[in-house]
Image: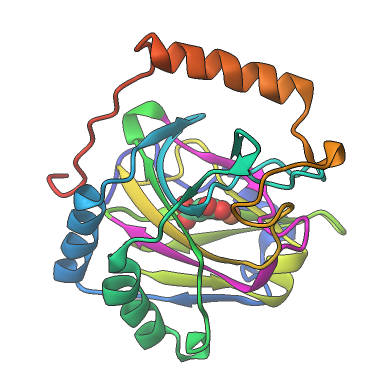
Amino acid sequence: MGGERFCLPTFFSSPKSRFNSVPGFILCENAFTEEEEAALLHAVDSSPAKWTRRRTRITKNYGPYYLYQERNTPQGRFRYTDGNIIHTPLPDFLESLVMPIVKRGVPQLEEFKPNQLHVALYKKEEDSKIHMHNDNKMGELGPFIVGMCLLSDCYMTFVRPKDGRRRVLHLPRRCVYVMSGESHHEWRHGILKGQTASDRVSFTLRDVRKLAVEEGAKVTKSSHMPSKKNIRDQRAKDARVQRGEREQLNITLADR
Ligand SMILES: O=C(O)CCC(=O)C(=O)O
Ligand SMILES: [Fe+2]
């Protein structure tokens, strides 16, 4: 760990963040070994899902393709192609590797059955970050969101819009964390620029209970159709892909 640009954001020292905890947030340190970490990275590398660039992060997505917008639209938080939510099958390593670690570290998660796994690579040299957001803004998730930190520590910033409270939590490499209760429903969170110690990989597990449209169903109601602008943007993107302009992301995590 180290690097001069990895330090607490300046507002951390403000009186509002003196009590550094967020209700409902559970942190399990040393939740997995270096060998397990290597196995998880190798499993992501071996999985056929494609890497996609999203703003400054690079991600692999399994389950319904999730967007981080907080606007309440009829199509919800999901990305569509031809009227269907993009859906990548869950990988085998979710059951064989990920869930045993999560349940061992946090026994309260015994009943937790995620149907979505989001793998993100935050690159230090690209100042990767994730903007402040609330994953459950539209109430589509079950009671837990679970995260895992691989390869690097980071600081996660929390803000509670109701009263402006702010907290910054240190998430160590190889931890498992859980957002439940207030941290899940009332706080927003993000990882700001410069707040990962080095290249970091995270796993986010969600239990998506409400899709705007039935999984796999054709969108027929006009109110469920993506906006004209979304359709235009998607067509332009598809055309770029066909012309081979899309960035080819050949990434290997295991050799980092
Ligand atoms: O990288 C992380 O640990 C957090 C990611 C996150 O907040 C999310 O995917 O919703
Ligand atoms: Fe999140």
Q: How many marks?
A: 0
Question: Which residue occupies 34% across, 36% down?
Answer: 123
Q: Quadrant of the C terminus?
A: top left
- Displayed quadrant of residue 82: top right
Q: Is residue 222 placed above or below 9 in the rendered structure?
A: above
Question: Which residue occupies 40% across, 45% down?
Answer: 196
Q: Is residue 139 placed above or below 155 in the rendered structure?
A: below
Q: Is residue 191 placed above or below 25 in the rendered structure?
A: above
Residue 149 colored magenta?
yes
Query: Where residue 150 appears, x then y in whole percent?
Result: 31, 58
Query: Where residue 112 appears, x then y in whole percent?
Result: 52, 81
- Displayed quadrant of residue 174: bottom left
Q: Is 173 placed left or right of 221 in the picture?
A: left
Query: Where residue 116 appears, x then y in whole percent?
Result: 50, 61
Q: Is 109 placed left or right of 256 in the picture?
A: right
Q: Is 136 placed left or right of 252 in the picture?
A: right
Q: Nearer the viewer, residue 133 or 225?
A: 225
Q: Nearer the viewer, residue 205 or 233?
A: 233
Q: Nearer the viewer, residue 174 or 145?
A: 145
Q: Is residue 155 visible?
A: no
Q: Is residue 153 placed above or below 98 in the rendered structure?
A: above
Q: Is residue 85 visible?
A: yes
Residue 132 colored magenta?
yes
Residue range highlighted in magenta: 127-150
Question: Which residue occupies 25% across, 51% down?
Answer: 47
Query: Where residue 101 appears, x then y in whole percent?
Result: 32, 78
The chosen color scheme is rainbow
- Displayed quadrant of residue 172: bottom left
